[in-house]
Amino acid sequence: MNSMVIKSTPEKVFEAIESILAQLKKHEVPMESFFDVKLILSELFVNALNHGNRKNPEKNIVVRYAIEFNKIVLTIEDEGDGFDYLNLGDPALDENILKPSGRGLFLVKSLADFLEFKEKGNVITVGKSLL
Ligand SMILES: Nc1ncnc2c1ncn2[C@@H]1O[C@H](COP(=O)(O)OP(=O)(O)O)[C@@H](O)[C@H]1O
Ligand SMILES: [Mg+2]
């Protein structure tokens, strides 16, 4: 299990994503899985940064991840108040189709093998097979 604690700035988020992807590259992951994980990481880190920690650079984002047995499991935690994750909107509904936001978690859900919110919604764990 690897872990990192970063401050909530776009630069730190960018570095964290790059360093996890660098680990992934060592595992000869198929290209499609690699890009899926990149998208998952981007969406979850951006949510932690913007919605969770509200871009407050003093607040931490904690990421824990393990890459083994051809899968990645990662947990991202922010210092925010969480949200009502049981009532997520469906971006595919007619009333939401033109909204520019609200698609990230939908995408993550469809790409990941499992996704679980914990605490108040400020902790999210996803798992994805890397085959
Ligand atoms: N880490 C988080 N902390 C608080 N609220 C969150 C978090 N992640 C997601 N949300 C809430 O869930 C909504 C849907 O997230 P998402 O599907 O990524 O869409 P978007 O980020 O485009 O709004 C967000 O608008 C926000 O209200
Ligand atoms: Mg988002």
Image (cartoon, rainbow, N blue to C red):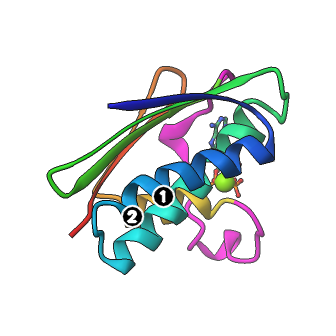
Q: Disc 1 vs disc 2: Cβ atoms closer than 8 Å?
A: yes
Q: Is residue 102 above or below residue 12?
A: below
| Disc 1, SS | helix
Q: How many marks?
A: 2
Magenta stretch: helix, strand or loop mostly: loop
Q: Is residue 14 above or below residue 74?
A: below
| Disc 2, SS | helix
In-image side of 76 versus 13 (left or right): left
Residue at image point 39% right, 64% down: 25
**Residue 24 magenta:** no
Residue at image point 34% right, 60% down: 26
Please give the residue where the numbered disc 2 appears in the rendered image.
Answer: 25
Residue 119 location in percent, x, y?
Answer: 48, 20
Please give the residue where the numbered disc 1 appears in the rendered image.
Answer: 21
Q: Is residue 98 above or below residue 56?
A: below
Instruction: Identify the magenta region.
Output: 79-101
Residue at image point 45% right, 29% down: 3
Marks 1/2: CA distance?
Answer: 6 Å
Residue 111 location in percent, x, y?
Answer: 39, 66
Of the 4 image quadrants, the one containing the C terminus is bottom left
**Residue sitting nearer the eye, 113 or 15:** 15
Of the 4 image quadrants, the one containing the N terminus is top left
Tell me which corner region of the image, top left, top right, bottom left or bottom right, holds residue 55.
Answer: top right
**Residue 85 magenta:** yes
Residue at image point 30% right, 76% down: 30
* Residue 42 in sight here: yes
Residue 41 location in percent, x, y?
Answer: 53, 54
Within 8 Å of ligand 2, the CB of disc 1?
A: no
- The numbered mark at residue 117 is none
**Residue sitting nearer the eye, 79 or 3:** 3
